[in-house]
Amino acid sequence: MEKPKVMVALRDAETAGSLTKLACQMASLAGTNVIALHVIEVPPGLPIDVEDPIFERPGQQVLSLARQIASNNFSMHITTKLLRARNADEAIVGEAEEEGVDLLVIGYHHDHGLAETLLGSTVQHVTHHAPCRVLVQVPAPVSKAKPQVEGKEKAEAGVEGKKREAA
């Protein structure tokens, strides 16, 4: 029986770490390795095979970070793929089909508009069309409450007052 395949779709350096760790954890449980994928979305006005460091560098950095995290934290060698496509969602689904992936790990970003309030368009497409199970990592909400910080004099007065009460 063939080992299951785990793929992680990486968008940016901010989320590559947590997504790579999650994919490596899943792969470790299954006794398999990880395929890390980054898709360069090429605008319609350019040829799909355009080779320009401006397009490639961010993806190469994300995949390099994924390799480093897998190696340092899990002693795992991962396969990386950098694809060019017009739409990341279709490219992710196509690659999952081509590779025979059993689990696809993808991240959701809260920076979407009103039309994508439940899930981003890429995540929506992938979850509906992927040929495998999809694990969506949603970041923890950022607290909007700001901690109260007392001034030094007020804090010292509070300590002195408590000392007097205790005496």
Image: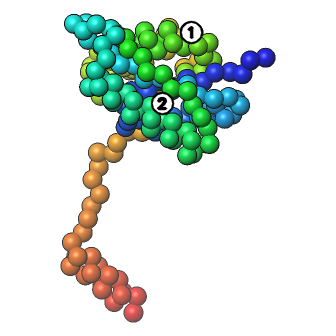
Judged by depth in the image, the label closer to the viewer, 2 or 1, is 1
The answer to whether residue 33 is seen in the rendering is: yes
Q: Amino acid at mark 2?
A: Gln
- Quarter containing the C terminus: bottom left
Q: Secondary structure at mark 1?
A: helix
Residue matched to label 1? 98
Q: Residues within 10 Å of mark 2 (few under 14, many from 20)?
A: some
Q: Residue 137 at what x, y percent from top left?
A: 48, 30
Where residue 110 sits, quadrant-wise, is: top left
Label disc, if present, on residue 129 of the rendered structure: none
Left or right of 40? Residue 19 is right
- Name the secondary structure under disc 2: strand
- Disc 1: CA contacts within 10 A as few (<14), some (14-19) or many (>=20): few
74 up-or-down from 153: above or below: above
* Kind of residue indicated by mark 1: Glu
Foreground of the two, 78 or 50: 50
Q: Position of residue 112 (x, y in %)?
A: 29, 23
- Sequence-wise, the earlier of marks 2 and 1 is 1
Q: How many marks are shown on the rendered structure?
A: 2
Q: Could you tell me residue 69's position as x and y percent?
A: 51, 41
Specify the farthest residue to the bottom: 167
CA separation, marks 2 and 1? 23 Å
**Vertical comparison of 112 with 87: above or below:** below
Rendered residue at 21%/72% (across/down): 151
Residue 162: percent from the left, percent from the top? Answer: 35, 83
**Residue 135 can be seen in this image:** no
Q: Residue at x 34, y 42 (%)?
A: 142
**Residue matched to label 2:** 137
Name the residue: 27% across, 76% down.
155
Residue most toward the right? 1
